[in-house]
Image (cartoon, rainbow, N blue to C red):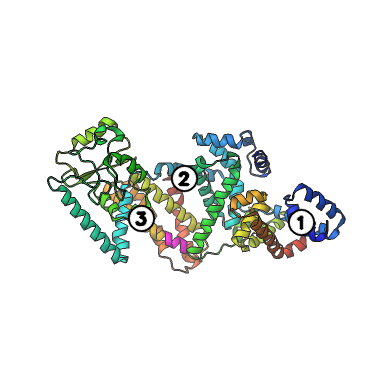
Amino acid sequence: MRCEDCLPLVEEYADGEVDEMTGRMMSAHLAACPECSDALDELRVEQELFARYERPVAVTPALWQRVRAAIELEELAAPPQTSVPPFARLRDMLAAALGTLAARPALASALAVALVALASGAVWLSLPGRRLETPGRLAGGSNATRPNAPSPAATGGGNQAGAGVVGDVPSADVADAPAVARKYPIEADPRREAQPTHFAAASMRTPPAGSGDIVVIAEDHLAAGEESAALAALPDDGPAGVVKAERQLDPEEKEVARHVEQAQMLLRSFKNAEADDLSYEKHLSERLLEENAALKVGAEVAGDKDTRQVLDAIEPFLLDIKNLRDQPSREEVRSIRERMKKNDIIAALQVY
Amino acid sequence: MKRLAVNEMSFELSQPGAFAGTLMNSTEELVTRVRQGDEEAFRLVFDRYSRPVLSFIYDMVGERGLAEDLTQETFVRAYRGLSGLREEARLSTWLFAIAKNVARESLRTRRRDGGRRVELDDESVFELTDGRPSPAGELLDKELSAVVQKALMKLDEDKRLVFTLKVFQQRSYEEIAEITGFSVGKLKTDLHRARAEMRRRIGPYLGGEQ
């Protein structure tokens, strides 16, 4: 082997990445060639130097606790396959009303037109003698099963009962509706987030059963008899559509928990960030501030004082970070960090 | 597969943070147990891999707090995605691939949201002194660490990635290719250039050593 063959392979040789035959040839050459062996020695010295590299990080029990808590939180707050958390809807609607619509008149107009169209559809559906003719699209008349016009699936009881489908689900026979509903879960389909029908359908979830209204029946934990009873309990001239969605445990709590976790991450990031570049934290706090306001309204409406207190505690920090100048002084940043420390806000949120 | 399994074990043994007691459990067994909902098994996975993963992420992002957050995110994603892991013996390679994605996403977000520079946090390095009298060698190592990290942060992302995986994490070219998605040719080139850059930047220090 010659030097021009050996030198280009010295790194691979040092890394143990050359094949056996090449390795033997190189070993023989290196033993006899000072130039090539110097190159190898230099690499080995570097490797020894890098082996002494220390990082100011350590795995602590707290890190495992954080991982565990995050997993538990995620399992609790896992986005349900076929439900829309009320707080998410509230947030979406508020955000849409306060932010997006103000900034985008064209979108506001489009939403208004869609809502008018939907309302017209609902009125049309409520007219006597009207039957559901175009299953598959709620906005277009809905494939939802009506008690006075039961599909074969709807009378079957249990979770196999005919489920209406919210949003832009492709047309399908009513009997196929349950499968379609699972294939196009409400939150799993990102397209639906942009659909006016999403907001419209969501906003129609709460009205009491009555002519022209749409009622959501929680699907997940209804036993066969319960669902049948629920359907039977609807008035004869009942709702225009029955929309089923999985029920989840305390969805508003999960929504708040997710928000609190994000706020905690933000504050942690703010605590560790360089003082002269906090654009990321400012941007995130602006978003969380909007969300915080929406959640506070929800907590207020629900009479949930504990949640309200937590959200109240977060708000000043979000506000302070959001209002920082683009190039804040170190004193301004330090002041917020000191207040965070004084209030022990990160730990408090972690406990939550 | 057999060779990889052996590599996994030797890698684990070579990690200072490896939890020796966990070596009683094979990687495959741990993965199976985690899939069955055994929290203790996931704790063992964490004990075994958290230190190299944290070090790797720190080398990529250069901030201690952020590295901890991203390590947390890595293990949460791993827990969530463990059912999708096809070859259980490749758990550590798979974990590093997640960590790489998490770190790169974070770096990308930072760039997009204002181009925060990833730089050495000098304070954090020198906080290691913890008030005890420092022998000369120890102080030298701290200075060396500061110099190495500064040089590391000046490498571009691809070079930093392959350099860290090879030089600090001792991964094979095959594993690095799997983790990064780079071809072996590209990673060899990046590694060669990264070594040259590092050599140039820590040259004065190297001279003192020699």
Do circles 3 and 2 both sit on a common chain? yes
The residue carrying mark 1 is A10
Discs 3, 2 touching: Cβ within 8 Å: no
Who comes first in sequence, dot 3 or dot 2? 2
Numbered disc 1: secondary structure: helix
Residue neighbourhood size for the residue with mark 1, other residues' Cα within 10 Å, grouped as few (<14), some (14–19), many (≥20): many
Residue B145, percent from left and from top: 67, 57
Amino acid found under the numbered disc labelled 3 = Glu
Residue A54, percent from left and from top: 66, 53
Whether residue B210 is visible, yes or no, is no
Instruction: Write down the chain letter for disc 1.
Output: A
Residue B40, percent from left and from top: 53, 35
Do circles 1 and 3 both sit on a common chain? yes
* Inter-mark Cα distance, 1 to 3: 57 Å
Amino acid found under the numbered disc labelled 2 = Ala
**Range drawn in magenta:** A278-284
Tell me: residue A189, above or below residue B89: below
Numbered disc 3: secondary structure: helix
Q: Residue at x 37, y 50 (%)?
A: A189
* Inter-mark Cα distance, 3 to 2: 20 Å
Discs 1, 2 touching: Cβ within 8 Å: no
Residue A79, percent from left and from top: 39, 45
Residue at far top of view:
A225
The mark lying in front, picked from 1 and 3, is 1
Name the one closer to the observer, B57 or A56.
B57
Instruction: State the quadrant of the C terminus of chain B.
Output: bottom right
The residue carrying mark 3 is A291
Numbered disc 2: secondary structure: helix
The residue carrying mark 2 is A70
Instruction: Write down the chain letter for disc 3.
Output: A
Amino acid found under the numbered disc labelled 1 = Val
